[in-house]
Image: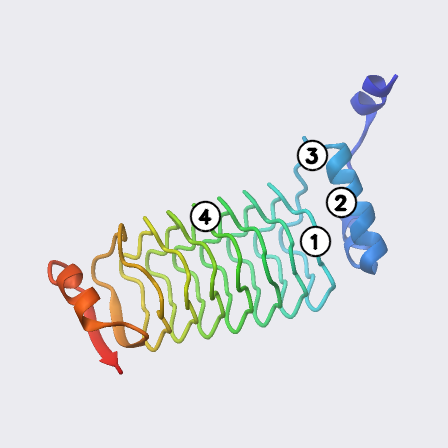
């Protein structure tokens, strides 16, 4: 009986999805219930505006969220794993322990976004803008940050093992406690970075085209 019901199930329209997600905590709970009941459903919400909404713990796994506006939204513990977020905006969004693992974050705007202790494992952040974002204690293992703007970003105690940083801009970034081991980078700008020790970095950077000026 349940199998017949699942077979006949039709996903909500874009308008119905937006209505749920803009209805506060109850709407998000209903959304999450539908996602759990129908894990095969891949919502298509590209171009929608979810600015300043309460999206705490929302389940956006594998959703099409290209060019969606999440500016100012509360996204604590939200799940964006494997979602397509190409061109999305998260300016001044507020979130802790957000899951972006294996998500497509190409060309996203994360300016002044609070995302400490978040998961970016194997995420693509190529050409993204993270100016003044807080990613302290976040995990970016094997993440791609090629051509990414990380100016004045806070990456204190973040894990970047195996990350690709080719042509990334770290001007003024806080890299206290960051381990270089296993990083891939060429042509990176580390101008006026904070929290680095010359003895730990100079030998590693010697063979690259990175430009470094330390601030003690």
Q: Provide the residue designation for mark 2.
A: 32
Instruction: Tell me the distance, in whole angstroms, between the alpha carbons under discs 2 and 4.
Output: 23 Å
Residue picked out by circle 4: 121
Camera-nearest residue between 202 and 60: 202
Foreground mark, 3 or 2, reads 2
- Is the residue marked by circle 2 packed among few (<14), some (14-19), or many (20+) residues within 10 Å? some
The crowd level at tag 4 (other Cα within 10 Å; few <14, some 14-19, many 20+) is: many
**From mark 3 to mark 2, how far is it between C-alphas?**
12 Å
Distance from the alpha carbon under mark 3 to that under mark 4: 23 Å
- In the rendered structure, are the residues bearing label 2 and label 1 in contact, judged by CB atoms less than 8 Å apart? yes
Q: Secondary structure at mark 4?
A: loop
Please name which of the two marks, 2 or 4, marks the residue nearer to the observer.
4
On residue 57, which mark appears?
1
203 vs 154: above or below: above
Q: Measuring 32% from the left and 68% from the top, which residue is drawn there?
A: 169
In this image, 120 relative to 175: left or right?
right
38 lies left or right of 157: right
């Amino acid at each position: 009986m349940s199998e017949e019901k699942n077979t006949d199930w039709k996903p909500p329209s874009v308008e119905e999805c937006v209505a749920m997600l803009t209805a506060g905590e109850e709407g998000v709970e209903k959304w999450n219930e539908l996602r759990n009941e129908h894990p095969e459903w891949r919502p298509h919400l590209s171009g929608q505006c979810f600015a300043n909404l309460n999206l705490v713990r929302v389940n956006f796994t594998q959703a099409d969220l290209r060019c969606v506006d999440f500016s100012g939204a509360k996204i604590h513990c939200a799940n964006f794993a494997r979602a397509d977020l190409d061109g999305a905006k998260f300016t001044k969004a507020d979130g802790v322990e957000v899951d972006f693992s294996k998500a497509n974050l190409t060309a996203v705007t994360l300016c002044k976004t609070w995302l400490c202790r978040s998961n970016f494992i194997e995420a693509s952040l190529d050409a993204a803008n993270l100016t003044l974002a807080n990613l302290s204690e976040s995990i970016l293992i094997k993440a791609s940050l090629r051509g990414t703007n990380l100016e004045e970003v806070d990456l204190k105690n973040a894990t970047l093992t195996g990350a690709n940083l080719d042509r990334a801009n770290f001007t003024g970034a806080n890299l206290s406690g960051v381990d270089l081991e296993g990083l891939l980078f060429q042509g990176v700008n580390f101008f006026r970075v904070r929290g680095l020790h010359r003895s730990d970095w100079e030998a590693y950077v010697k063979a690259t085209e990175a430009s470094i000026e330390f601030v003690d």
